[in-house]
Image (cartoon, rainbow, N blue to C red):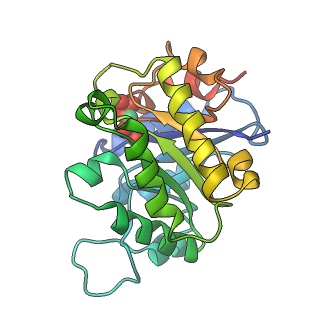
Amino acid sequence: GRKFFVGGNWKCNGTTEEVKKIIAVLNGAQVPSGDVVDVVVSPPFVFLPLVQSLLRSDFHVAAQNCWVHKGGAFTGEVSAEMLANLGVPWVIIGHSERRLILNESSEFIGDKVAYALSQGLKVIACVGETLEQRESGSTIDVVYAQTKAIADKISSWDNVVLAYEPVWAIGTGEVATPAQAQEVHHQLRKWLHRNVSAEVAQSVRIIYGGSVNGSNCKELAGLPDLDGFLVGGASLKPEFVDIINSSL
Ligand code: 13P
């Protein structure tokens, strides 16, 4: 079976005091062992060392982004090799906020995933359609194209978790229904089966993100093709613990 995966994407939020508070909650929480659930929290870059120094050893950290190639004269960027050097094991790549607000293309994201993997990082790669795309019936085409742009650039999916995050569900309180989530997750697995391999389709974790909270997580966690969550707003609150425990 695929190990359940719960990621907390803090986005551009937090102060030193708030970081210490949420870490204290996580460190005190009763959760299943690391053999049962992978828990990864993703603070802004500037808080990564603080979180690494405070966080319990069975939870791990992710950066929210990294530069697409080797570091150098790229003002304001943080390279994959810097993250590796700091012992940051994971990085989120291709979040819709970066695709849409920072204009990152699918090809750029594919390159970024490949480079991060080459530096030994594990990647949470995000895909997802906008409301307009869903309403025009192109959801599956969109997530296929985004997944293909990644698949075209990588030779192994061993260190990749795929996150399906419908843009219309992010930060809106409008969570995908279990049927909507299961359908896209199932189609993504089918795509991997046809275009990568049966083995990868079977083993890659496909997690859901978009308005997941302590009350709606349980129903989604039971879906056959859903292997965990990428949580935004609720990852800054104590209910993140309930989401970590949702697969039990
Ligand atoms: P919310 O959980 O705040 O909707 O955000 C989801 C998300 O974008 C996680 O990466």
Query: Which quadrant is home to the N terminus?
Result: top right
Q: Is residue 154 visible?
A: yes
| Of residues 125 and 40, the one drawn nearer to the viewer in this rendering | 125
Residue at the limit of the structure toward the bottom, as seen here: 72
Residue 141 location (% of width, % of height): 40, 44
Identify whether 57 is placed above or below 214.
Answer: below
Residue 177 left/right relative to 3: left
For image coordinates 54% across by 55% down, the residue present is 53
Residue 30 left/right relative to 209: right
Residue 40 location (% of width, % of height): 56, 45
Q: How many marks?
A: 0
Quarter of the displayed picture in which ligand 1 can be seen = top left
| Of residues 180 and 18, the one drawn nearer to the viewer in this rendering | 180
Identify whether 90 is placed above or below 57.
Answer: below
For image coordinates 53% across by 63% down, the residue present is 151
For image coordinates 46% across by 21% down, the residue present is 213
Q: Is residue 229 visible?
A: no
Query: Which quadrant is home to the C terminus?
Result: top right
For image coordinates 56% across by 25% down, the residue present is 243
| Of residues 216 and 51, the one drawn nearer to the viewer in this rendering | 216
Identify whether 228 is placed above or below 9.
Answer: above
Residue 62 location (% of width, % of height): 50, 54
Residue 204 location (% of width, % of height): 66, 49
| Of residues 72 and 184, the one drawn nearer to the viewer in this rendering | 184
Question: Quarter of the image holding residue 185?
Answer: top right
